[in-house]
Image (cartoon, rainbow, N blue to C red):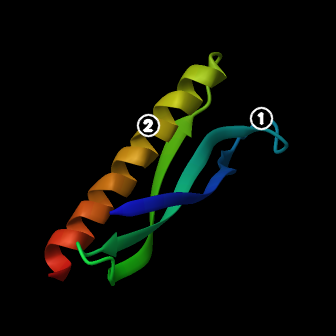
Amino acid sequence: LHGVIKEIQRRPFRLSRRNLLTSDEIQFTIAAEYFIEGSDGKLIDKGVISGASHAVIDSNFQLSERQAMEDASKRLAQGLMSRLSEGW
C-alpha cells in the first residue's frame, strides 16, 4: 500500500453572527491517493479517499487546527480501511 497526500483544505464552515467577515467554525479536508501493488509489482487497486473534520475557532487557533487535522486524518484512514476491507 502506497499513499500520497494530494490536498489539504481549510475553509470557513460557519460565519459569525456578529461579524460576517470572521468564521466561528472551520472545515478541514485531507485528500489522498492510494495504490495497492501485489508482490509481483502489478497494480491491484488505486483510488482517492478523503477525510473531513470541523473545528470551532477559539482563542488557541493552533490547538484547534491541530486537533481538527488529526481528526480528519483519522477519518481518512478509517475510510481507506473500510474501502479496502469491503472492496475485496
Q: Residues within 10 Å of mark 2 (few under 14, many from 20)?
A: some
Q: Residue at x 85, y 42 (%)?
A: 21
* Amino acid of disc 1: Arg
Relative to residue 87, is residue 4 drawn left or right?
right
Q: As rendered, which of 12 and 37 lies closer to the eye?
A: 37
70 relative to 10, above or below: above
* Amino acid of disc 2: Glu
Q: As rendered, which of 66 and 81 lies closer to the eye?
A: 81
Q: Residue at x 31, y 74 (%)?
A: 37
Q: As rendered, which of 88 and 59 lies closer to the eye?
A: 88
Relative to residue 42, is residue 17 drawn left or right?
right
Q: Secondary structure at mark 1?
A: loop
Relative to residue 28, is residue 33 drawn left or right?
left
14 relative to 18, above or below: below
Residue under numbered circle 1: 18
Q: For the N terminus, which image quadrant?
A: bottom left
37 relative to 21, above or below: below
Separation of marks 2 and 1 at Cα, in angstroms: 29 Å
64 relative to 79, above or below: above
Q: Earlier in the sequence, mark 2 or mark 1?
A: 1
Q: Which mark is residue 87?
A: none
Q: Which mark is residue 70?
A: 2
The location of residue 78, given as percent across then percent down, is 27, 56
The location of residue 61, given as percent across then percent down, is 64, 23
Based on the displayed image, in which of its 4 quarters is residue 83 positioned?
A: bottom left
The location of residue 20, given as percent across then percent down, is 82, 45
Kindly report which numbered mark, 2 or 1, lies closer to the viewer in this rendering.
2
Based on the displayed image, in which of its 4 quarters is residue 65 positioned?
A: top right
